[in-house]
Amino acid sequence: MPSRRVVPNSPYMMRRMTVSIHERKDWPRFRWDQKSLEGRLGAVRHSQGRLIGRMEVLGFQVRAEATLQNLTEEVLKSSEIEGEQLDRNQVRSSLARRLGIDVGALTPADRKVEGVVEMMLDATQRYEEALTKDRLFGWHAALFPTGRSGMNKIRVAGWRTEESGPMQVISGPIGREKVHYEAPSADRLEKESREFLRWFNDHNGMDFVLKAGVAHLWFVTIHPFEDGNGRIARAIADLMLARSEKSAQRFYSMSAQIRQERNDYYRILEDTQKGDLDITRWLDWFLGCLGRAIDGAEEVSASVLRKARFWVRHAHASLNDRQRAMLNRLLNGFEGKLTSSKWAKIMRCSQDTAIRDIEDLVHQYLLAKDPAGGRSTSYSLIASPSDALNVVAAHARANADRFVRNGATPRDAETTAKHGAKIESLAARIEALAAKSNATFREFEAISTDLHRCGFFPDSQLVSAVAFAMEGAR
């Protein structure tokens, strides 16, 4: 949520009536109901251990890929929470280069992306090191390499000053802003930050997961910088979570989960910052969000495993560098449809070269042509039997209402509609088969026979792709 500097004695200052948490006499002596949090904390700790244990048996390369994928999400989503969109390929390439992970052709990253990545890696890879004022200043400088936030010049690598005026967290259009929170005045920041850092680095026996939640709230409440406080608060929490797991490898993304729950995140922050020093509700929400982030790691680990298995199956495939790079992009989650023109643009090659690369992958059953043709011809990755089956189903649906039997007279409208409906039904059966983990080619052949009876003949290349994918998956 954006912050702003406010001119002293402005109408915005006059409107603020609620006492902020940092203005209370007992600040910052936070308290919480430990007993009510025990169940939630225990469940999160159990989920952490189970996830780490499951990832440990998958081998170094798979764990490295999972870390790369989750750190990419963490960087992207932490910025997205603040309304800033970063380029996914730039973020991934920057992380891969710094982590020493081979992902093929690297996309050059701009200074902004490099800075955010540098901060995140410093937090998670050097989690055992003390958090200091100088380290925080380094993170802030990395976030704002030009010394500006958007068009506005800001103080970088230093606390807010009196000259910048009071700092408020706001939302809404200009002239109708809603003030959610006002941070401590600049003359308090040196003392406030010193007390926070002393507590953060103190080995006081507090559970590190709980400490991550308290640290997140405490830092964002101090709000010591002119901008970037939310991203730095989440990086601080990530540092403490890495410390709780004694591992620099990241198998889930807390920021990705917060992004999904952004409205609740801001609401609970605002309520807590306007309340007393009892932060039980905030910690309960934080632990719940963390638990949901860990549960969501199943999807990421499945994606990483899918990619690892793909390359094991196709370890001896004859591929050039462009093909390997594009297949990795598709495995990582390519946005939109793959066409020859996109290939040429991304791989920086001619259209003819792109077409040759694609056709070669089609012949190797690694890509399949989508139903639409002509200028809009696009291609789908065949990474598993289900991918191949779904492409066949898509072709069947696309042709359900415009087929004729080879060499026969076109049917009348009623017969065509009847057979079209039958093909739709068979396409649904193919999709159901794709969802099975143990689907066999014999089952597919039985459905194909029924398709033939209706006058639809799946392309032989697609049938071969299904057979090849099923054989490779054994």
Image (cartoon, rainbow, N blue to C red):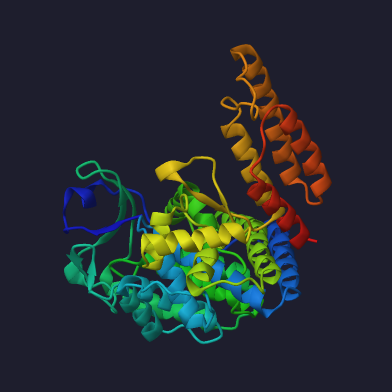
Residue placed most toward the observer, 188 or 357: 357
Percent position of residue 109, x then y: 36, 73
Image quarter for residue 67?
A: bottom right
Image quarter for residue 189?
A: bottom left
Residue 420 as seen in the image, left or right of residue 438: left
Residue located 77% across and 59% down the image: 471
Residue 422 as seen in the image, left or right of residue 273: right
Percent position of residue 442, x then y: 83, 45
- Residue 80 vertical placement versus 119 (above, below): above
Would you say residue 222 is visible in this rendering?
no
Q: Quadrant of the C terminus?
A: bottom right
Q: Quadrant of the N terminus?
A: bottom left
Residue placed most toward the observer, 55 or 170: 55
- Residue 60 vertical placement versus 419 (above, below): below
Percent position of residue 176, x then y: 24, 41
- Residue 60 vertical placement versus 312 (above, below): below
Residue located 69% across and 66% down the image: 309
Residue placed most toward the observer, 112 or 365: 365
Residue placed most toward the observer, 379 or 115: 379
User: How many dots with numbers?
Assistant: 0
Would you say residue 408 is visible in this rendering?
yes
Residue located 76% across and 74% down the image: 57
The residue positioned farthest toward the front in the image shown: 407
